[in-house]
Structures are given as C-alpha cells and as structure tokens.
Image (cartoon, grey):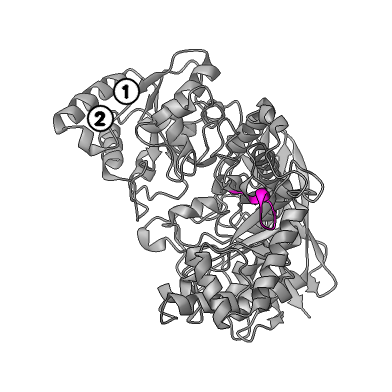
Amino acid sequence: QAALAGGSRVPALWALDAPRGCSYVKRAAQFPAAIGLAATMQPQFAYAAGRIAAKDARAAGYALAVTPRADLGLDKRQVEGALGFGEDPHVAGAMVRHIVRGMQGDYKTDRQRVAACVGRFVGAGSVSEGALHEYHVPPFAAAVGAGAAALRPQEHVALNGQALGAAAFVQRTLLRDTLGFRGVMLGDARATSQALLLRSAANATDALVLALNNTSVDIVAQPSDAVRALLDSGAVPEDRLTESAARIVQLKKDLGLFDRPFADTSLAGTVGALQDVEAARSAVRESLTLLKNRAHALPLHAHERVLLVGAHLNSTAMLAGPWSVHPQGVTRAEGDFVYEGLGHSVVQGVRQVTGAEPLFHPGWALDASVATAADDERAFDALVKLARRSDKIVVGLGDVPRAAEPDLALDTRQQTLVRRLAAAVPDKPLVALVVSGRPRILNDIADLASAVVHAYLPGVHGGLPIAQVLYGHASPSGRLPFTYPRHEYQATSTVWQSQSLEYAPQWPFGFGLGYAPMRYSNLTVDLDQLRVGSPVTVRMTVENLGTVDQLEPVMLYTTQSFRAGYEPELFRLRKFDKVEIKAGTAMQVAFTLKAEELAYYTRDLVRVIDPSPVNITVNALTPNERSISVNLTI
C-alpha cells in the first residue's frame, strides 16, 4: 500500500525462499529438500514441487520464489548442498528445467504461478574456464532454456583467480549474450562485495563499482545512498541504472502486479491440500535410497517385533531439518509442536502402517549437555532390555539440529550408541536410517548394520512414506545423487572426475537397491560407429526377478578411452530414465546417444570431439553394470 500511495506508484515485488515447497508458509505442503528430489530420478516431482510452491506463494502474497539452486554440490561438506540437485550436471539440469517450468508455467497470464529465481550463477570454489563451461554452466543453460525469469549470482567463487562478482565475461558475455538470459539478476550485499571479500577491490565502494559496471546485477541489498553517490559522481553511468530498472519493471508487469499487487486470498484454502501432501509423500517414497540389505533385513513384516530407536524417528522437526519455518529449522523451544497435525514422524507412520503401537526408545539425547554419564547408562540398559525382546532394530541417525557440523562424520554419541547396541545384541538385524541432506561418513556402522537407508531431508510428511517403504508397501527406488564418501578426504570426489584420480567411495553416484532383484541383459547398439549426425540407439532388456513390482532407474554413461591432450572422465552420465517393471516380467529400455554429446571444451573454450573408442555403460559401478563399446568418429 505504501508503494502505491505516492511517488512512481510502482508496486512492490515480494520474494520468498521456497527451497522445498513453501516451507515458510503455515500448512503448505513440504517436499523433500532438492537433494531428495534428485534421488527420485523423476523430474516430474521437481515439476510438482514447483507448481505447488508457486500456488502457495501466491496465496501468501509472494510473486517471486528464490529457488531452485542450479549450482553443483561438489563439496559434500557444505550443508547448503541439500538445496541443490547433487553433483551431476545432467541430473541437475533435468531437475532445474522441470522445477522452473512447474513454478512459472505461463506466469505472464497465470496468476497462480510465480517467477523463479535460480541460484547461484555460476561455479563453486576456484574453477577453470573449461570446467566452468563443461560442468557448471549446463544446469543454468537448462534454467534459461526453461524461461527462468530471475537468477542469483554465486558468492566466493574465483575464475582463473578473478572474482566472479567482477568478471564481465561471465556475468555479461556468458550470461546475457551466450546463454541469452533476459531476466532480472537478484543480488544481495555479498554479491556486490565479493571482490572485497576476495581482496580483488581496495574498499567497499570499489567493490560496488566493479559489481555494477562489470556485471548485470539488477537488485542489490545496498543502501540507496551508496548507489546514488556513485551515479552522481559518474563512477556508474545512469544508463546502467536505466537498464536494471527496465528489467525490474518489466518483471513486475509480467507478474501482473500492476493489476493485482496483493495476495490472492482465494488461494488460501488450497494451501496444504490433500493432493499436495500426497504429491510430497510420493516424492519421499521414490527418494528413499537403500544402500545395503544383508540377508534381506528389509522389508520389515507386521508379525515381527521391531524396535525403533532414536530421536530422528519420533520427530517431525528432525525429518524437516533446516529451511523449514526458519532457515535453520525450528527452534528447540518450538520442537515438534509447530508441526502438530501437519505431518507424521516415522513412529506415527509405523503406527498407521501396522495398526499397532510401535515399540520405541529415544536412545541417547543428541545434546550431551542435557544428559549425564549415569543418565546414558540407565537409558542404554533399558534399550538393551527392549532390544533383546525384539526381532529387528531400526536406528535413526543423522544431523544434529542447529549444530555446527563442518565435517561429514556422524557425531560421536550416535556412533557410540550404535556400536554398543550392536555388541550387546549381535544376533539382531540392525537397520540404519540416515536422515541428512548430506552423505554422513558411517565408519564401521556401515559394516555393523544389516541394512542402510538414506532418507535425505524428507520433510514433515516423510514419516508415513518412510514407514511404507520399511514395511514393504513400496520398494525403494532412489539413487544416490552424489558420491557417498568413505573418508573425509573424499568429500569432493565425483563420478565424472578424471580417470587418473582415486574413486573408492563407500557407495558410488547412482547407487541404490530395491527389494526386487533385477537382471540386465542383451545390451546392444544398432551401429558400431558413433558419428556426428548419425546417433546410435542403445537397447537393453531389464527383467524383474522378484515378487514385487519395482520402479527401476536406468542410467547410461560414457567413458572415452583417451582424449588428445586432455583427461577423459571416469564416467559421464548422458541419459537416465525410471521405468516400472512388474514382478516376474521384463521390458526393453532404449536410449539414443549422439556423438555431439561427447564434445568437450578445450582450454581455449573450443568444443571438440576426439575420435576414440567409447565404452557405453549402464548403471556404472553397481551390481547391474553392463558395458558395450563403439568407435567415436568425426
């Protein structure tokens, strides 16, 4: 109302972080964090998350959603990696494309859609230009191709030693000219002070001048007096201000804010609709990634006496994690009360699935400051008594809320509890359910556990679908969207790294099991020469040998034998699909592969194709790996 009351009467544009649905809006359906959506290997879930978030954001009066993240999660130690779609450019690109389309639709006419602001352009850490173009740019190209209305710049990134916040080549030539982005660049104080943080500017004023003149950022969280002084002095030309103002006003016009500047109250009743919650639950079900299942410890059965252990299994707040209610998640004082009636813990989900009261023990308090050694011993004695009367044990592990955890190892209290429990009841199958947006280094727990399930950050609706998968009402079908390290030093390993580097993780990118054993056979190509303009068709037969239906992700990689003067990748994902195969049946899966897809960037940023033998591999580094070779020719 203030904006419309005087001056230019240009309506205000309100932006909302929506990293997993509108998780800051009361009752809104909360989807898994983006890393969980990536694990589904189903871009349709990204579309649904975007569409529902857009509607809920409009109901709350927001027309710009600050999501998704298109930057790759290369360092698994970064907590914010959960907001992105993992380490692979192809998976990230597919997910980003669909979530942008879901959010925006025809946002210039459909007032239940919003503008998506895709972050963070572009790169991570210190990157070379070749790596930037080969791996980091493609997800943003997918976003721009999907019509993304806004982008956010990356922070603390250097390209060949130059702060990206001052790199005109990247922020103007690459973004605006090469990729063809015509939308708004939404920055913040860090975006305009990046050069100062990286010691690429003498002071804050110089950093702001570099950011405004060398880049195309349009909205910055800076005092207006600072920008006005630069305009008055001529350090920043007035045309630069006019350029940004035009883009901002156009976006507001496209969003219909001049006609309807306020929230659409008619949408309020649709927030948290049952179909929205069901869509979120479906995403959780298909994200759950079974990493180990010794002696068929899973699925659980209703006739078994199952002991559930740990706070992660009896708390919706634990399933939600950060970026829910508050950026760091709910406060300790709020606890689960804020979600009461809006979701399910795993314990509540098991109660609904089995129709019986679950056997539960909280384990040790995650916060050591609230328990003495004597408290821990009394709790452990009670836990062992319950464990000895049980057939199987499910232990919830994962992040400690609001704790600073710079490394990937589980905190020592969780590790110690599992070790002591496994030693006390060595004859009981133990299932480890990991609730974390990052891979957590499990050390010997990976060997002690009979089964390991990674649940990512499933959200407040996660308890029921987790219980359904644990009890076999659905077979797990998620696949790791990151390389799961065995040791801390492997935190930056990727499946597309150089063949000369060690790749010996706990579990590789793309790994995941189901309850139904699958058999891959008859891998063929219709041509043995892969030529420019003459693609090959790769076919295979996938057979479900089990007694349950299985959703099966099929992932196709290429590996070049050599490249002239450059290192080829270990495995490069080119295609993926998820197919449903009924129990006891088989189906044929086919992909089309083009020689042009194997082009790569040289240091001169020339995209070339090197003739060489190429291995085409399905489901690399998994029990169902199959390979066939073709010759790549020009």
Residue 435: percent from left, percent from top: 44, 40
Q: Residues within 10 Å of mark 1 (few under 14, many from 20)?
A: many
Residue 122: percent from left, percent from top: 58, 68
Specify whether residue 498 is in view.
Answer: no
Amino acid identity at mark 1: Ala
Instruction: Say what secondary structure mark 1 lies in.
Output: helix
Relative side of 294 to 52, left or right? left
Q: Is residue 5 magenta?
A: yes
Relative side of 542 to 378, left or right? right
**Which residue is the extreme one toward the right?**
533
Residue 424's disc number: 2
Residue 617 or residue 198, whichever sits in front: 198
Q: Is residue 552 above or below residue 574?
A: above
Q: Quadrant of residue 468?
A: top right
Measure the alpha-carbon separation of dots 1 and 2. 9 Å
Residue ID at (72%, 60%)? 249
Residue 124 or residue 544, whichever sits in front: 124
Q: Which residue is mark 1?
A: 387
Q: Residues within 10 Å of mark 2 (few under 14, many from 20)?
A: some
Span highlighted in magenta in the image: 3-15
